[in-house]
Image (cartoon, rainbow, N blue to C red):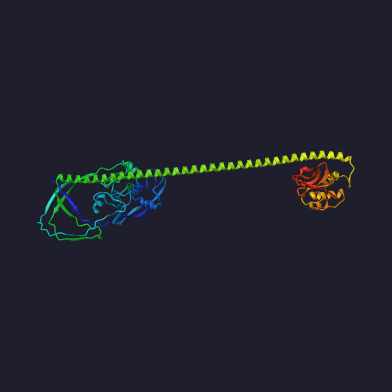
Amino acid sequence: MKKTIFSVATLTALTGVSAVSASAEEVTVKSGDSLWNIAQSVGTTVADLKAENNLKSDLIHPGDVLSFNQKVEASKDTYTVKSGDTLWAIGNEVGLSYKEIMSINNLNTDLIFPGQTLKLNVDVVEEVSVPEVAVESAEVEVTEVETVEATEPSTGAYVIQTGDTLYKIARETGVDLNTLKSINGLKSDLIYPGQVLALNGEVEAPVVEEVEVEVVEQTPAVEEVTEVVTEAAEVVEQTPVVEETSETTEDVAATQQAEADRVAAEKAAAQKAEADRQVEIKAEQERVAAQKAEADRQAAIKAEQERVAAQKAEADRQAAIKAEQERVAAQRAEEARIAAQKEQQRIAAQKAAEKRERELASQQASQPVSQGNGNAYTIALNLAKGKSYVYGANSAYAVDCSSFAQQFMAQYKGKNIPRTTWGQRDAGTRVSNPQPGDLVFFNNYSHVGVYVGNGMMVDALNPSEGVGLRAVSYVHGYVDGYYRY
């Protein structure tokens, strides 16, 4: 039976393609994700994702929640290529095949570069003139049986359209993205127009039915038609012209082969784009890993520097503590040594004074008092008892060297001599053979004591040595002379 094929001719003016406006959505980052594959899965770009989420770099972490703008179609005539774009990805975004984009822009290869501007429509200004054609009037009645293959839509399947993504299909059909991939055995997010996806694990087979078509051809009324399609026109479809064409089996086979070649080329381009995407993903993962490794290394260096600095600070503190302890110990040892030395001198002087006191007492017991009220030794010792040294003092409890000499001379001889050492020097007579009761002067007359015989004297020396009996030689310096009154 002769097979009759009917074709419908349609004239369409392409004035634009879809661009995008935005509707806010969110996606949670999973392990292994990158900004590139998230942008591809949700139908946006890496630059838009970074701008929407105020990201300064491509670094993201599992659990991060990213906002993105769901694309809504709007008219747009051009597209500016961004880093990472491919013709296949741009075609998916704007609703064209990569071959259509190449044809519109007269591209010989799929090589594009960032910043390049691609046209997305064909400006058509064309006048179509249909001349008058003489056609014999005839009426042909043809009754044929034609096998028509029709696919009944099923709620268990989805036919992929240009611009679809798995994420968009999952959201529209209510099927989880991972479930959709599992049902259809997909290892990646790569899909292509015309592909049929199962939604519940089952896809119904196409329904084939026979349709009896009755065609009646009549003499068409032919008239001259002139039509101008401009860039600003909306999509216009002419009245379909129905023609009857007889094709051989070879023609059908050739047409099918051409379609198969087209699908294969698109699939190869999609596979290449996916391979490039995987390379970019791997490079991004390596960059992120290197960035994290460098951050960890810098953190370790900083931690080590802080540890060393803290260790040095503690060592310096311990050294300072030890030095201070040693200084205090040395100071205390020196003070103890000086105190012990002074105590030894005091004890030695006391013993010498006690010995001399005994000797003088023994000698003076046998000697008569030369002058005054009692002997000089006894008067001087009795006068010294209970007194302390205070510079400038002159009382019954506190004296300095010259006031002690003044008080002694008043008791010993009843004479009132001057208060200062220099005045006392001037009031006395210098002698070369000192006797008990004379005054002895030291160091340019800056100190005076009461001589009591046998190289001993009683004086008010200083606050630490006090008032008492001591050898004339005990005073540092030199003796100026002895004076009698």
Image x and y of residue 71, in percent = 34, 53
Nearer to us in this view, 176 or 298: 298
The total number of labels drawn is 0
Nearer to us in this view, 258 or 308: 308
Toward the front, the furthest residue is: 432
Image x and y of residue 268, in percent = 26, 44
Left or right of 297, for residue 134: left
Nearer to us in this view, 327 or 207: 327
| Residue 399 visible in the picture | no
Left or right of 126, for residue 180: right
Nearer to us in this view, 452 or 44: 452
Residue at 77%, 39% in the rendered image: 348
Image x and y of residue 344, in percent = 74, 39
| Residue 298 visible in the picture | yes
Image x and y of residue 137, in percent = 10, 56
Residue 11, quarter of picture: bottom left
Quarter of the image containing the N terminus? top left
